[in-house]
Amino acid sequence: MINNFKEYQKKKKLFIEYNKSYYDLNSPDIDDATFDQFKKDLIEFENTHNIKDKITNIVGFTPSEKFSKIKHQEKMLSLDNAFNEEDILDFYKKINNYLNNNNEFREELYAEPKIDGISASLSYIDGKLARGLSRGDGEFGEDITENLETVDEIPKKLKKKINGELIVRGEVYIQKSDFKKISAKFANPRNAASGSLRQKDSINTAKIPLKFFAYGTIFKCHHYSSSQSDFLKFLKELGFKVNLLGKIVKNEKEIFNNYKQLEEQRSKLDYDIDGIVYKINNFQLQKRLGNLSHAPRWAIAHKFSAEKGISKIKNIEIQVGRTGALTPVAKIEPINIGGVLVSNATLHNEDEIIRKDIRINDTVVVQRAGDVIPQVVEVDLTKRKSDSKKFIFPKKCPCGFDTIKDYNETTKKFDAVRRCPDRGFECNLMTKEKIKHYVSKNAMNIEGLGKKVVENFWELNLVKLPTDIYKLNFNKISQLDGWGKLSAKNLENSINETKKISLDRFIFALGIRHIGQENAKILAKYFKSINNFKKLAESRDQIFNSLLDLDGMGETQISSLKNFFSNKINKKIFLELTKYLNIENVLENSKGKFFNQTFMFTGAMEKMSRSEAKQIIENEGGKVLGSPSKKLNFLVSGDSKPTQKKLNKAKELGVKILSEKEWYQLINF
Ligand code: IVH
C-alpha cells in the first residue's frame, strides 16, 4: 500500500530500475513475488489518483536504438478494417470495380484468423534463415534476427531446398496458457510478445515461450505458388506452422457463416485472435490489385465485435485534435476490458452526448475493439442517481477561441463536430497535437519523440512549435528527470537522421486538414521538389487550380491547402522547417517503359478499370492526363462508348490513338 505521492514517486523510480534489470539483464535483482507486489501497489495508487505517466505503459519497454534499421524489400502494410457485413460487401464491390468484374461474387477469398501478436518478416537465403525484421514503421524494420532465432516454431533451415531468397511473413504470439504464467508483468499477451521480442539480450527472449504462425510473403516471391491457399501448403512443407482454421470462402453466405463460427470458437482457442483477414486467394489478382500507401487493396480485416465493460463517468473533458475538432472524453473509473485497462472513453461529439443523454456520474457501457479508441455506448438509466450532472458542451475552445460547425454543401447540414478554427499555430492545444502528428510514425518518424515526450517537452516549454524540435538543447535534456546522456544523445541522433526526408512524408507531416498520406503522395509526385512545392506559399490561384487536374485531389483538398498557405504563421513555420531539413526530390521512375510518356483514356474497357490502367501507367513511370493537349502521347480508346470529341481532338493534335486491343498488347495483358 502506498500512502502519498512522494512515496509513489520513490517506489516508481525503484520499480523502473527493477523493471529494467528484470527485462534487460539476465539476473533480476529482486524476486518475482516482491516485484509483483511492488507493481500491484503502484497500479493501485495510479488507479485512485490522477497520474499521467503510468507504469503499465513502461512495463517491458526497452529502447529500440539498439537494433539496426533495415529497409523492407516491400513495405509491411497494415490492413483496412471492416466492422460489419456492409463493410465487407463494400470491400468486395471496390475489388470488382477495380478488376472491372460484374458486380457479383467472382473472386474467391481466403479467410484466416487475424492473430493478435507482432508481425515479423523472415528472409531465407538458400533455405537458411538469414535475417528477421520487425515491422517497424512499415518501411524500415528493426533487425531482431537473434531474438527471432530463439523462437522454436521459426525454422532455421527449411525442409526443402530453396535456391535464392524467400521472404516469409507471419505473426509472433504468445499462447494464452503460457501468458498466464507471466501475466503479472504485462498488460496482455500481445504486449508480452512485443516486449519479449525487443529484448536487448536474446536470452531474455528465449525465456518467454513465443510461437509463430506464417501467413504470407511479398509480391517478389509469388512465383512459388499461384494462390494464398497453395502458398500456405508450401510453407507447411517447408516446416512452418500455419493456422489450420483458414479456408477458402466463395460467397456472402460462406463468408458470414465462417465469421460466426470463428467468433464462437474464439474464446476456446489458446491464442488471441481479433478478427478474420480476407485475402483475394489468387496471387495474380492480388498483384493486379496492388497496394495503397497504408494497406493492400487485396485484403481486409473483419474485426470481431467489441468487448464491453461497465463503469462510471467521473468527469467529461474536452480534447482538441490536430484539426481543431473538440472531442468530449469521458474519464471513467478504470476497468479491465479484454486485458486492457481503460480509463478514458470517447463520447464522439456534442450531438452524441445529447442523443444518448450521457451525464457525469452515470453508469455506462464502454466498449473496446482492438486498437480502436474505447467508446461509451450507452447509459444504464436504471442506475442513474440524483447526483448525475448534465454536461454543457462549451461553445469556446479551451484556448479561448469561439468554435464553429462546418456547413456541408453536399448534405446541406451542419457538422456534428465543433471545431476551433485553424488559425495557424494560435490555438495551443491544436498546436500540441500538430507537433505529435509531425513526429509520428507515418510523418517524420522521429524515434524517441513520441506523444508522451512531446507532452513533457511542451509542459517544460521546450517544444511549442514544430520548429523548436530543431532548436533543442540536448545538454539540458540529459539533465531532465528520466533522461540521461545516452538517451539525450539518442534523441539528438534520431532528430538528425530524420532531417533527410522524402517530400511526401514532409507534406503529410505538415498536418494540413484533408491532406492524408495518399494526397501527400499525389502532391509530392506532382511538385517533385520542395522548391516547386514552396510555390504554394505564394498563394497564386493558378497553382491551386492546376491541382484540380490531379486524380485524387478535389475542391475540399485544394481549399484546405489554400487556407493553410494563406495563413502567415503557417507560411512562416513551413518555410522555417524547410531550412532545417534536407527534403529529397521525387525521382522519376526513369526505368519504367512509359517514362516520359503521357496517356489519356476515353470509353470503357472490358478487361480492366480506369483505375487499374492508370496504376499500370504510373508503375511504369508514365502519366495520365485529364484533357488532350500537345503534351499527350497516347489516347487509349476503350471499345465501349469512346467520346468522339476527344478522338477528333487527338487526331487534330497528331496524338497516337490506341484501340483497346492495342493497349492490352502494349502492356502484355
Ligand atoms: S496479412 C498487407 N494475415 O495484422 C498486410 N496479417 O493489421 C498483410 N495479422 O501487421 C497482413 N494475422 O501483423 C495478415 N493472418 C494474417 C494476420 C495478419 C495477424 C496482423 C499483421 C499485420 C496486421 C495488419
Image (spheres, grey):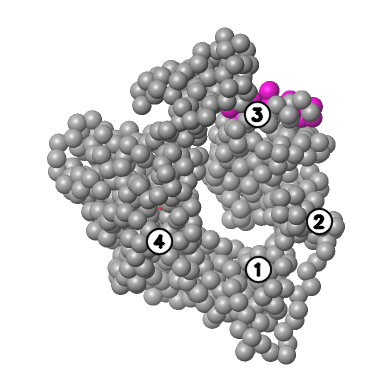
Mark 3–mark 1 distance (CA, rounded to whole Å): 39 Å
The residue wearing badge 1 is 347
Q: Residues within 10 Å of mark 2 (few under 14, many from 20)?
A: some
Q: Are marks 2 and 3 in contact (CB under 8 Å)?
A: no
Side of 177 where 659 appears, left or right = right
In front of the other: label 2 or label 3? Answer: 3
The residue wearing badge 4 is 275
Q: Using the rendered view, name the quadrant where residue 651 is placed.
A: top right
Side of 322 where 594 appears, left or right = left
| Secondary structure of residue under mark 1 | loop
Q: Does the beta carbon of the residue at mark 3 sit less than 8 Å from ligand 1?
A: no
Residue type at mark 4 is Gly
- The quadrant in which the C terminus is found is top left
The residue wearing badge 2 is 404
Counting from the top left corner in percent of width and height, residue 9 is at 60, 68
Mark 2–mark 1 distance (CA, rounded to whole Å): 19 Å
Q: Earlier in the sequence, mark 2 or mark 3?
A: 2
Q: Earlier in the sequence, mark 4 or mark 3?
A: 4
Mark 1–mark 4 distance (CA, rounded to whole Å): 25 Å
| 662 to 268, vertically: above or below | above
In front of the other: label 4 or label 3? Answer: 3
